[in-house]
Image: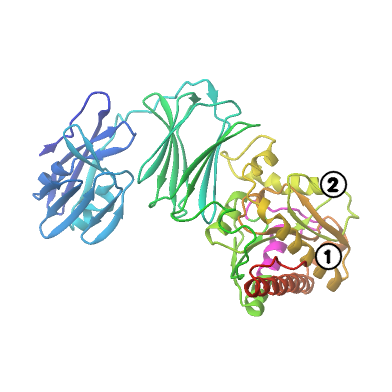
């Protein structure tokens, strides 16, 4: 038995793909897949019902597929289906085609077995799938990037030149037509932050289209154009949540969760000392020790961005903290300098302007990890430009500075280490954090004396105690301000 999905004009084409479904007794029939103008592949639920000897019915925007005593329910314009009482999220929303309803092809993988136990796709031929042709616009794409924040997800198209665009929103996606963009290949970024499932930039009918596929209902969608370089910025907010500043700029909330970030990892060793001590190992050991002390002593939950020798991209570190809705982000590193006599500890917070040349050099070294992130990573020099596109840290800068000062004071005093000061620079790893964030340099591996100390468990434990003490003092003062704000809401918080 062969089943076909109809074709209507140029909006829909039939893929030369025959999908065969069957059970243990053999083949039940063939389904032909259609690709629509949105680039997604679909099957006809009425034809699937015929293959499965079931029934398909439609009432308004709701369609029902019954096989035996099991039911699959679909809603036009929605990606979610209910299959035998269980929600199934499909790649594309159910929609109407030229000859009836169309259901996303991945229903055959995600829902068919639950609707008709024992039935599955047994064969598929895809010998001549259509190839998306490059879009020859006049404006080249420089970069597609995103950041996940607690209240919104931001997606940026950077082109460097002015670009025309049109935004259309629906329940399951945000679609942006970019008629002037030159696109050589499709780009897909998996996000999966509970708001945006993925971002797809692809050619559709000779026009570049940016699709933000949603995981659920979104709130407000904002789009802004920024210059130098030209960027189209799209912000998709969670329902009933405002912008970062409107959510209570300066409002204090109890500290509940800290993300500790051990620098480097995996194939990124970080700095290496004269005798081979690696920064990634020192940072992870000290970070684990700090985590144990904070959880035991402060009653605050601690989550590590990495808890083993694995590589984590700079962007994913703060994305992770944002998804965790962390209250603080602390990144721990060991330093390096061409002059082997350089020594001491220092802390950093994010700023567009570096404190001095030394701070700028440290940031450049740490930001250089971007080059290790694979073929899709930025291969151009403007890393600082890329980390300041959202200014997410601007409202946390004062709090970050205070935390950096408190932690550094604890480390230098308790361990009698050279205090190199609190500094500021453009660290990419701090750029996307939607909470106060600092970077700690616990010593110079390029200094033989400090490398010997950093190699010992005793010194690492002492460093962990000092960092913990600094965080404890920060929390003590923070809680004091919180109590004052709660008892005297009309007054401003006292000076620190």
Numbered label tally: 2
Residue pictured at 25% horizontal, 53% vertical: 111
Q: For mark 2, what is the residue?
A: 356
Q: For mark 1, what is the residue?
A: 452
Residues rendered magenta in the picture: 266-289
Residue sticking out furthest to the front: 490
In reply to whether residue 269 is colored magenta, the answer given is yes
Left or right of 160, for residue 67: left
Spot occupied by residue 252 in the image (x, y as percentages of width and height): 63, 66
Residue sticking out furthest to the bottom: 297
Left or right of 246, for residue 169: left
Q: CA distance from mark 2 to mark 1?
A: 28 Å
Q: Nearer the viewer, residue 173 or 36?
A: 173
Identify whether 322 is placed above or below 32: below
Identify whether 187 is placed above or below 52: above
In reply to whether residue 292 is colored magenta, the answer given is no
Left or right of 137, for residue 63: left
Secondary structure beneath disc 1? helix
Residue sticking out furthest to the right: 341
- Determine the image quadrant of residue 455: bottom right
């Amino acid at each position: 038995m062969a089943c076909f999905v109809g074709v209507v004009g140029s909006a829909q084409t039939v893929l030369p793909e025959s999908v065969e479904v069957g059970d243990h007794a053999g083949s039940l029939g063939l389904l032909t897949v259609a690709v629509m103008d949105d680039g997604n592949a679909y099957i006809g639920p009425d034809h699937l019902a015929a293959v499965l000897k079931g029934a398909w019915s439609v009432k308004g925007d709701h369609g029902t597929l019954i096989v035996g005593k099991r039911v699959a329910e679909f809603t036009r314009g929605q990606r979610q289906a209910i299959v035998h009482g269980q929600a199934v999220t499909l790649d594309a929303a159910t929609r109407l085609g030229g000859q009836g309803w169309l259901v996303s092809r991945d229903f055959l993988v995600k829902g068919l077995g639950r609707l008709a136990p024992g039935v599955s796709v047994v064969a598929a031929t895809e010998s001549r799938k259509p190839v998306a042709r490059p879009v020859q616009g006049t404006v080249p794409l420089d970069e597609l990037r995103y950041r996940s924040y607690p209240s919104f997800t931001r997606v940026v198209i950077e082109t460097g030149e002015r670009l025309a665009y049109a935004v259309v929103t629906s329940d399951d996606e945000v679609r942006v037509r970019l008629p002037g963009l030159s696109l050589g290949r499709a780009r897909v970024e998996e996000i999966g932050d509970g708001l945006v499932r993925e971002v797809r930039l692809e050619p559709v009918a000779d026009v570049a289209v940016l699709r933000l596929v949603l995981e659920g209902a979104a709130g407000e969608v904002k789009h802004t154009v920024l210059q130098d370089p030209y960027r189209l910025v799209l912000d998709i907010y969670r329902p009933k949540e405002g912008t970062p500043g409107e959510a209570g700029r300066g409002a204090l909330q109890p500290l509940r969760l800290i993300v500790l970030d051990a620098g480097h990892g995996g194939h990124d060793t970080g700095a290496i000392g004269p005798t081979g001590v690696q920064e990634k190992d020192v940072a992870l050991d000290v970070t684990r020790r700090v985590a144990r002390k904070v959880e035991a002593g402060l009653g605050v939950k601690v989550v590590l961005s990495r808890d083993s020798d694995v590589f984590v991209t700079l962007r994913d570190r703060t994305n992770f903290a944002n998804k965790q809705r962390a209250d603080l982000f602390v990144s721990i590193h060991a330093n390096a300098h061409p002059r082997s006599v350089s020594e001491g500890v220092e802390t950093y917070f994010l700023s567009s302007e570096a404190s001095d040349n030394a701070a700028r050099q440290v940031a450049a070294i740490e930001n250089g990890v971007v080059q290790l992130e694979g073929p899709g990573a930025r291969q151009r020099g403007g890393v600082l430009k890329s980390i300041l596109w959202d200014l997410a840290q601007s409202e946390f800068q004062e709090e970050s500075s205070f935390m950096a000062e408190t932690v550094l004071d604890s480390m230098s005093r308790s361990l009698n280490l050279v205090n190199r000061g609190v500094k500021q620079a453009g660290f990419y790893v701090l750029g996307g954090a939607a909470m106060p964030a600092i970077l700690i340099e616990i010593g110079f591996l390029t200094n033989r004396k400090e490398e010997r100390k950093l190699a010992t468990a005793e010194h690492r434990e002492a460093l962990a105690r000092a960092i913990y003490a600094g965080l404890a003092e920060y929390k003590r003062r923070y809680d004091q301000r919180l109590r004052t704000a709660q008892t005297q809401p009309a007054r401003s918080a006292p000076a620190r």
